[in-house]
Image (cartoon, rainbow, N blue to C red):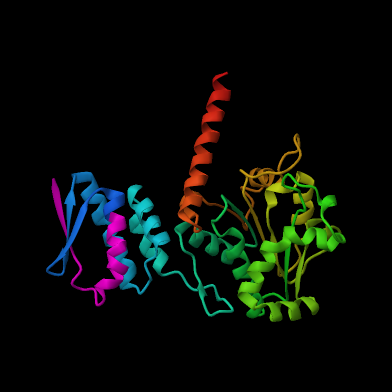
Amino acid sequence: MAERLLNISHLSNPSALFGNLDQNIKTVERQCGVQVVYRDSALKISGDEPNAGLAERILGSMTTLVEKGEPLTEQNIRYIISLAADGENEDLTALTDSACICITQKGKPIKPKTLGQKKYAEAISNNTVILGVGPAGTGKTYLAVAQAVRAFKQKQVSRIILTRPAVEAGEKLGFLPGDLQQKIDPYLRPLYDALFDMLGAENFQKQQEKGCIEVAPLAYMRGRTLDDSFIILDEAQNTTREQMKMFLTRLGFNSKMVVTGDITQIDLPSGQSSGLIDAMRVLKSVEDIAIVRFSEKDVVRHHLVQAIVKAYEKANERARRKKFEK
């Protein structure tokens, strides 16, 4: 049985570390298999040596967040635990220094929540074309829209253009009611939602009517040159090689392009290769183009989403090994 002491006398508000009914401490105890007791302005950690050391690193990182005025949530505690388990928790300090990207309509600041998101936000700021690739729930689209809104509000660009390929995920567009716009709106809904969150429905409507914001299917991009624009292509894994090339060559002067997608969720017909996978291969050495890859650690939705992503990755890896062995 090992014991570790973590001095927290410098914390002005220790209750922020403990959480409601000590839930934060209980989460660490449960995840690490240790016992944590608060006594004389210090945390006494008891357990097997590897577990006690892990818990000390986790609680140390949590203390750093509290010192910086960051709230502790179930999501970021789980993130700290995953970083500490891989020996990466020291990098967390850099995350607390991340600048706010923009403020939502409800006054909530939008900041990177993971190291992967921080790298992505920096890549968008420092490059003209950015490919953000990773599993669902990593904030690829939301952070890109936030960056677009900031650039628009600061008059770095004169318009925002968001687009997606209208590819069915097991359902047929023709069976949906309404005209073409009504049929494709469900595909564009995540983009509308992000813009509503940051601009408000009324302001979004006004900017859309003025032509400053455009949300349209990828097919509508053909033949255009997009100057002075912040352009986002979402669900890019469902583009063909030809569509991806068409989109990328729309880039005009004083514009920025962000391409997002999840290469594990390709809905293209059998036999067609993904334009996103092809672009990652073709563009990997091109200057001013950044490729940012997210992992399941960067998932910021319900913690089960992270577990689901990891389970599917393991299943796919087993299937690949089995296929190779044959």
Which stretch did the figure color magenta?
1-28
Q: Which residue is located at x 34 percent, y 73 percent?
A: 68
Looking at the image, residue 174 lies above or below residue 12: above
Where residue 293 sits: x, y (%)?
Answer: 54, 50
Of residues 120 and 66, which is closer to you in this image? 66
Which corner quadrant of the image does residue 10 belong to?
bottom left
Please indicate whether residue 290 sits to the left or right of residue 46 in the image. Answer: right
Where residue 69 sits: x, y (%)?
Answer: 35, 74
Where residue 305 sits: x, y (%)?
Answer: 51, 51
Residue 234 seen in this snapshot: yes
Of residues 109 and 74, which is closer to you in this image? 74
Q: Quadrant of the C terminus?
A: top right
Q: In which quarter of the image is the N terminus?
A: top left
Please indicate whether residue 101 sits to the left or right of residue 96 in the image. Answer: right
Of residues 176 and 141, which is closer to you in this image? 176
Q: Which residue is located at x 56 percent, y 29 percent?
A: 320
Q: Which residue is located at x 68 percent, y 57 percent?
A: 234
Q: Which residue is located at x 37 percent, y 67 percent?
A: 72
Looking at the image, residue 255 lies above or below residue 81: below
Residue 19 seen in this snapshot: no
Is 256 included in the stretch rendered in magenta? no
Which corner quadrant of the image does residue 260 belong to?
bottom right
Where residue 149 sits: x, y (%)?
Answer: 64, 73
